[in-house]
Structures are given as structure tokens and as C-alpha cells.
Amino acid sequence: MRNFKKRFEERYDELKWLYMELYDNDAMLVELVNRMKEFYKDRPDDLKERDIIREKNPRWYIKEPLIGYKTYVDKFAGDLKGVRGKLPYIKKSNINVLHIMPFLKTGKNSDGGYAVADYRSVEPALGTMIDFEDLAEACHNKGINICIDFVMNHTSNEHEWAKKALTGDGEYMSRYFFFDNAELPHNYNRTMHNIFPTTDPGNFTYIENLHHYVLTTFHSYQWDLNYKNPRVFNEMVYNFLFLINKGVDIVSLDSMSYIWKDFGTSCRNRPRVHTIIRILRMITEIVCPGVLLLGEVMQDPDAAVQYFGEVGKPECHMLYNCSLMPMVWNAVATRDISLLKQSLDIFYSIPKQDVYLNFIRNHDDIKWRLDFDYLQRKGLEKPSHIKYLNDFFMGDAGYSHSKGELYNENEESQDAKFCGRTASMTGLERAKLYKSKELESEAIRQILMLYAFLIMQSGVPVVYYGDELGLLNDYSYKKSKNESEKNDPRNIQRGSFDWEGVKKLTDKYSTEARIFYWLGQLESFKKTEPVMGQEAYCWTLDTWEDGVLCTVRSYEGTKVMSLFNFTEHEKTAWIDERDGMYQDILSKKKREARNIELPPYGFYILKRIVE
Ligand code: GLC
């Protein structure tokens, strides 16, 4: 208990202060502390050792180059045991952070696992908690960190609490938000808030036998938890610690910006969310300091960045960088990198200890959250530009070969989000349909250019499962017997992994090998070059060409310049760096960094040769 005691004493004053500010409830605080002690006692010795090593090197996740991979257990390998069997493939793919999406028991409707019915047991089809522990241990033995989601904003309507609430038990009803018809908080900002399809009316679901509405921000079967109730907070912390003790390294706090509701506001990013995350950070530092908190805040970068916390009062260790994905695809559709460039300029000036996880695609839709003030100055109006982006990626405008589907389409405002996999969005699906080798090569080049861009950024690049092989959209969800699955186009990017495709990696001319091999080269560069680390200085250079982006990294005398052609045309980057010769890290050829010609969707990564 010595370690616990020391860590606890260092933090207790602040912990108590914040807890009392939220709940003003001594008894619940005492219970929380007692349970923390128990979870510490139960924590396996090997994890405690891991904690101590990391405590001595608290910036381990900044110093060690991390590369992530995000996947579903069932889609990737059937079940948890299956995933364990596939770790050699993960290792071969240069991955050292494996993020498996929710695998806990869900109800009939699962939202891809994000509707948890029991935080203490695994969905039977995916295995058991022992299987998860074995997987985590096997990952650790191979130098892989394991990341899971903690779905904290809501439970499934089939969670024990929800079931008890349904009987009218006030103890359990008070763990959610119930309203009778007359008292529905009408000023609750529905339009801002209604980002996921919900049943009528808006974000509230009518519970017939109780004659009440329950708050359901996402789907009707995901009931929002009431964190104003200390019982909810404490129990969720216990669930969190229970899962962490199974061997988790990184916890992705799902939809965390929603957890505190102040009706009459947008109910997002409320100050109390920060209090809760700060308490969670301290609890983690006391019980399991080797574990990292990863914030999932799918909102404006200015609001998101606050979740790193303040100096001396940190909240999340890492955050998803949600603004990059729409900006990257916007650059593709407009053949114009200026918006991306200006936001990189801002991004490159933020404190270097802020670690972001970068991705170009994930399991969710692409919401066109762009800087429309900036775009307007270029003459692009929000509604028509969103329509253009969606039309482009549907393959209906702008000479595009992309394929995908719209999500949450609002015919009146013509607003919609977009779903599709990287490979299909770059034209690989159509290339295969038309049997066009030329289109296929173009798509492969585009996939590699986009991933090269991702990998060349500071932070953790996250590969969405299958992208490393050029996995296409999967339309089979339309035949699902489960209505909610069938009506959710996000399933287009949630198909089964292609193990047949993996077999093709031995044929170096296959689509799969052409992507996998070069991606691997880029990842190795990221992992081995200190200039790719968080400490490097980064900036952009003007190329005097709308579709060509140039980014530069510099660290301890090493300088790397990357050029990316976001267009289907040959382009020249009109740069003129006169500080020596450069080497192309992929072809190994020497060259000057002047007037560089790039093939369609081409890219170069040039490292300055130090004489
Ligand atoms: C997260 C998940 C998304 C899910 C939502 C609600 O944003 O990425 O798939 O629908 O949370 O849990």
C-alpha cells in the first residue's frame, strides 16, 4: 500500500475539494476512497510494476513513437481469442497501440458496442473477461499497448439500472434523466444537439409504461447517465477501475464532453465535465498511474484542447484530433490545401507535450466541421460547399471516383454527413468495378499520399483496420435483420477484415502489397527517426501551387521536408531550399529541394543530407 498512500496523499486535497464541489457528500467520498484502495489491492502485480516503470518515466508515451490501429473484435478476428491469434499480423504492421472497440455485453441494439448493458462482462459471442486479460497480457509481451473505450455518457436500455428504472424504481430512475411530458426542457438545444438519429421527439425517448420521457442524446436505446447523482459517478468509476485492472493501457473516454447536462445550454463541454475528468485523472494517477486517458471530443478544436487541462491540473493525456479528417478530405475534393495549411500553422504552434491521435478515417461518419468563415472568404458558402463535398464523395460531382453513402441527411437544409472507407473514397472501388489499372494505381497513390501526410504529423497516427490493405466499403449491412443496424450507413465502413487479402501480401504486385509495403516503410521511418518525435519544430512552406502541401520538421540538426500533391494532375512545388542536398527516404535518391515535380497524388519525403 506504500505506493498508493504516497500517491493518494499528494492528491487528496484537490480530489476532496473537487468531489465536494460536485456532490457535497462525505459518505460517498469515503466509499469512493475505500473502493479505490480495494481496486489497488486487486491490481495484478505485473500491472503494478508497469505503473512504477511508467511513473518514473511519465512522458513515456511522448518519447516512445506510437502507431495505432483501431478495429472491432468480431470484424477483425471473430472474438477476443481470435484477436490474440492475430497479434503477429499487428506486430508486422508496425502497430504498438491496438484499440479494440467496445466488446462488453450490449443489448439487442448495440451501436457497434457503444450501448453497454454490463460493464463487467464481455459480449458472449466475443469471449470472456479472461480472454480479454489474456489478450492484454499477450499484447504486453509483444510490446503492444491495449486501448479500449469506456462508454461513459450512457448505458444500454438493457442495462440493469435501466431495467430497474423501467419498473418505476426512483433510485434507478434518478441515475438517468426522466421528464414528464409537461416538463420536457424545451429550451434544450435540440438542433445543435441532434447529431445522431434518435426516435421522436428529438433527443427524448418516450417510455410508455412510465408515461415519461428519458434523455437519449444518441440513439433511443442509449440512455444518458445522470452524473449529478454521485451514485452514478462512483459506480462508473468502479466499472472503470475494474476494466483497467484487466490490463488496459489506454482508455478512450467515449463521448465524454456530453456527460454533464445543464439544461438550457448545448449540454456539451460544461465546466463540470472538466471537474469530472480531472477527478478521473487523479484517481488514475493514484490507483494505476501507468494508464493513459484519451479524450474523444468530436467538437471544435478550441473546445477540445481544453481537455488537456491546465498546468498542474492535467485532464486527458491524449486527445483525438477530430478536425484533421474533414480538412484532409476537403483538400482532396477542392484540390486546394489552403484551409489545411492554415490550420496546420496554428496546430504547429501548440505546446509540444499535447499529444493528438490523428486519423483520416474511423468507424464514424465524416461531419463537415470546417472553418466556414475562412472558406467564405474564398467565396464558398457553407450549405453549397457541404453539398459539393457530399456530391463529390458520392461520385456525382467534381470528376470524382469516390463511392460512399450519406448519413443523417436533412433534405430541407441539404446537410448531411458522409460515410465511406478510405479506399472507396479514393476510387479503388470504382477502379475494380471498371477493371481500370490506371484508376487503381491512382487510388493506391492517393491512399499512400494521405497516410504519408498523416504519419508525417506529430502525434500518434491511427490506421483504421483494413486501410493498410485497401479494404473497400461493405454494403452487407443493408441485409441485416436488425433494424437499427440496417438503417445505419456507418456500417458501410465496418465490414469484415480481409484475411484473404493478407495472403496476397506475398505477391508484390497485388493492390494489398502495394499499400501495405509502402505504409510499412513510412511507419518504420516514423518509429526510428527522432525528427518524427513530439519535440520537433514543424512548419509549412508555400509551394505556390493550390493543391500541393509542404510541411517541414526539424530536430537537432535533422530536417525533413514532405510534399503532398492532393490533385490528380502533375504539379510542381515551387520551393527553393538552399541548405544542402536532400535524400528521398523511399527511393533513396539524392536531389535538390527545388522546383519539385510531383506525379498525380504523389508525395515525397526528403531528408536533408548532413555532410
Ligand atoms: C462515439 C462512437 C460512436 C457512437 C457514439 C455514442 O462517438 O464513436 O460510434 O455512436 O460514441 O456512443
Image (cartoon, rainbow, N blue to C red):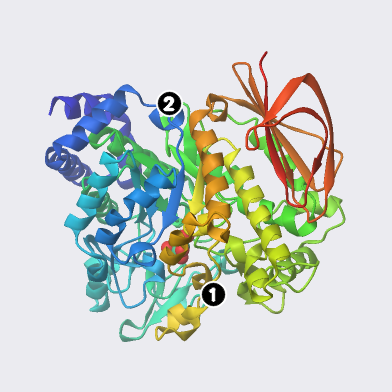
The residue sitting at 56% across, 40% down in the picture is 522
Q: Where is residue 424 shown, x and y percent of the image?
A: 62, 66
Label 1 CB, ligand 1: below 8 Å?
A: no
Q: Nearer the viewer, residue 523 or 221?
A: 523
* Residue 244 in view: no
Q: Nearer the viewer, residue 405 or 251?
A: 405
Q: Nearer the viewer, residue 410 or 446?
A: 446
| Figure check: 533 above or below 146 | above
Q: Where is residue 146 shown, x and y percent of the image?
A: 33, 46
Q: Where is residue 446 shown, x and y percent of the image?
A: 68, 54
Q: Which quarter of the picture shows residue 404?
A: bottom right
In the image, what residue type sits under mark 2?
Gly
Q: Which quarter of the picture shows residue 170?
A: bottom left
Query: What is the CA distance from the residue labelled 2 to the residue labelled 1?
Result: 43 Å
Q: Which residue is mark 1?
A: 489
In the image, what residue type sits under mark 1?
Pro
Q: Where is residue 521 shown, x and y percent of the image?
A: 54, 40
